[in-house]
Amino acid sequence: SYVLTQPPSVSVAPGQTARITCEGNNIGSESVHWYQQKPGQAPVLVLYYDSDRPSGIPERFSGSNSGNTATLTISRVEAGDEADYFCQVWGSSSEPYVFGTGTKVTVL
Amino acid sequence: QVQLQQSGPGLLKPSQSLSLTCVISGDSVSSNSAAWSWIRQSPSRGLEWLGRTFYRSNWFNDYAVSVKGRITINPDTSKNQFSLHLNSVTPEDTAVYYCARDPVGKGGYLDPWGQGTLVIVSS
């Protein structure tokens, strides 16, 4: 099955930029979706198809995808961005939704 | 705005069956484009997709290999909801269970998610 690897944690100061990577074999040929999950809450979609934002998601959230790495970038980080972030790709008909290992973003 | 509301018991004994329901508002379980999934999350396994149901002139289901043989997902068009049944649970099935919609089906993403149900399997 397809494996998506994320760093366990990323720390960033308020106002700075956080970059969260998602590594997978030739992931650049896939569409990558990103979710934010705050403690005790369900995941929320923050980016889809690599870089599209759902309504209500700030422009501070952006994405890129090339080669073996997809990246979620959070600019001008705020305290409210502290959460776990997961990437996801379409796998196959037998495992359509493949999730990354998750990254905990801590705002210092 | 699509919303998903989950319900079902949260405490089970080993060998019992898990049953959860997800009520849909703002969309239809019979949508010809969407697909309706169950996902679980635990510290040991992370986010794990379990299965889905969708309608494309007929009803279809896909199930994860890890739970195949124990899982059934059923749509209920009269109540606009879908359900998860997982048989013969063990402590390893302890997790938070979520329902979610894929608006586009193949190649898609999951949005929105239900609120989650913590299921604990313990004797």
Image (cartoon, helix red, strand yellow):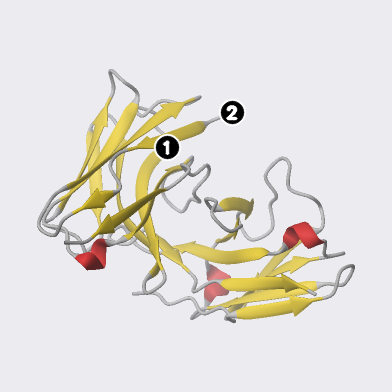
Residue B59 in the image: above or below residue A96: above
Q: Residue at x 46, y 66 (%)?
A: A99
Q: Residue at x 36, y 57 (%)?
A: B40
Label 2 marks which chain's residue? B
What is the x, y in percent for residue A93? 31, 57
What is the x, y in percent for residue A4? 48, 76
Residue A34 in the image: above or below residue B76: below
Q: Which residue is mark 2?
A: B1
Quarter holding residue A2: bottom left
State which tag comes first along the sequence, 1 or 2.
Answer: 2
**Quadrant (top left/top right/bottom left/bottom right) for the C terminus of chain A:** bottom right
What is the x, y in percent for residue A39? 58, 58
Q: Residue at x 69, y 58 (%)?
A: A51
Q: Which residue is mark 1?
A: B34
Q: Count the numbered circles shown.
A: 2
Residue A63 in the image: above or below residue B2: below
Q: Residues within 10 Å of mark 1 (few under 14, many from 20)?
A: many
Tell me whether marks 1 and 2 sit on the same chain.
yes
Q: Secondary structure at mark 2?
A: loop
**Which residue reaches farthest right?**
A15
Q: Residue at x 29, y 61 (%)?
A: B94
Callout in the foreground (1, 2): 2
- Amino acid type at mark 2: Gln
Please give left or right for residue B116 compared with residue B15 in the image. right
Quarter holding residue B99: top left
Q: Disc 1 to disc 2, how far (Cα)?
A: 14 Å
- Amino acid type at mark 1: Ala
Label 1 marks which chain's residue? B
Residue B46 in the image: above or below residue B77: below
Quarter holding residue B61: top left
